[in-house]
Amino acid sequence: MRSGRRDFGRDRAAMVAMQLRDRGIHDERVLGAMGAIPREAFVEAQDRSFAYADEALPIEAGQTISQPYMVARMTELLDVQPGERILEIGTGSGYQAAVLAKLGARVTSIERQAELVPPARARLRDLGLGDLVEVRVADGSLGDPGGAPWDGIIVTAAAPSIPAGLRDQLADGGHLVIPVGPRARQILMDVTRHGEEWSERPDGACVFVPLIGAGGFGG
Ligand code: SAH
């Protein structure tokens, strides 16, 4: 299929309407951010014509860019306010970080696959979001205690259980959004801090690539 002449703006608007709004994403700011970030810039060249398909797509290093609905739902659960400091674990393509930055968040995003980081940084810079997102190469499976408290933490890879320490790194009232479960299938968990107590709410099934490291699989 030819992708060069494709009208990505129209594809993006249709994605927001049918995959997000019609399926229950209500937060207008999230819908606006998803309608503004060009997902075609975050997928591999040969997949551009599928950039707004209702699915995750492969990126370098055997990883994936999440399905648009999942990005929107996780962002909605995080309840990001402008100026908040958000920790993302699993930069991948940089798309989720771009959506968070578009909402005015200051994002620290950690990625363990070094080869993914230069292209992610370049995409964010080209969109004028480079100053809002710091991308770092590390094992982020135990979070980043040095930067805590975080106003929100989003883990975009599957963890066998909630990694030790992530709850403690949340600011009061903050959300930790994380897929938890075995490698094949997980439940998206929304953990909210209330002082020294944490509530946990399951938000449905999902499938993510594994979080690899000390707090994840094979640590
Ligand atoms: N948020 C990404 C999708 C990420 S896919 C996007 O919008 O495109 C999950 C990513 O988590 C992969 O790139 C994988 O390499 C990374 N990852 C897995 N374990 C990790 C760890 N311990 N620390 C940081 N990143 C990790």
Image (tube, grey):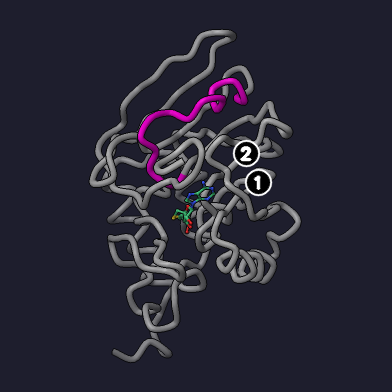
* Residue at 41% in and 89% down: 5
Residue segment shown in magenta: 156-170
* Residue at 67% in and 71% down: 126
Say which quarter of the image contains residue 182: top left
- The answer to whether 103 appears left or right of 24 in the picture is right
- Residue 150 percent across, percent down from the top left: 65, 30
Task: List the residue tagged with mark 1.
Answer: 107
Vertical placement of residue 135 versus 128, above or below: above
- Residue 16 percent across, percent down from the top left: 37, 56
Label 1 beta carbon within 8 A of ligand 1? no
* Residue at 53% in and 17% down: 193
Which secondary structure lies at badge 1? strand
- Residue 143 percent across, percent down from the top left: 59, 36
How would you rate the neighbour count of disc 1 (Cα within 10 Å): few for under 14, some for 14-19, many for 20 or more?
many
- The answer to whether 196 appears left or right of 18 in the picture is right
Q: Quadrant of the N terminus?
A: bottom left
Say which quarter of the image contains residue 194: top right
Q: Residue furthest top?
A: 196
Which secondary structure lies at badge 2? strand
Residue type, numbered disc 1: Val
Of 167 and 43, nearer the camera is 167
Q: Residue furthest right?
A: 131
Contact, mark 1 vs mark 2 (Cβ under 8 Å): yes
Distance Cα–Cα, label 1 vs label 2:
5 Å
- Residue 57 percent across, percent down from the top left: 35, 66
Between disc 1 and disc 2, whose residue precedes? 2
Label 2 beta carbon within 8 A of ligand 1? no
Q: Is the magenta stretch mostly helix, strand or loop?
A: loop
Q: Which mark is residue 86?
A: 2
How would you rate the neighbour count of disc 2 (Cα within 10 Å): few for under 14, some for 14-19, many for 20 or more?
many
Residue type, numbered disc 2: Ile
* Residue at 38% in and 83% down: 46
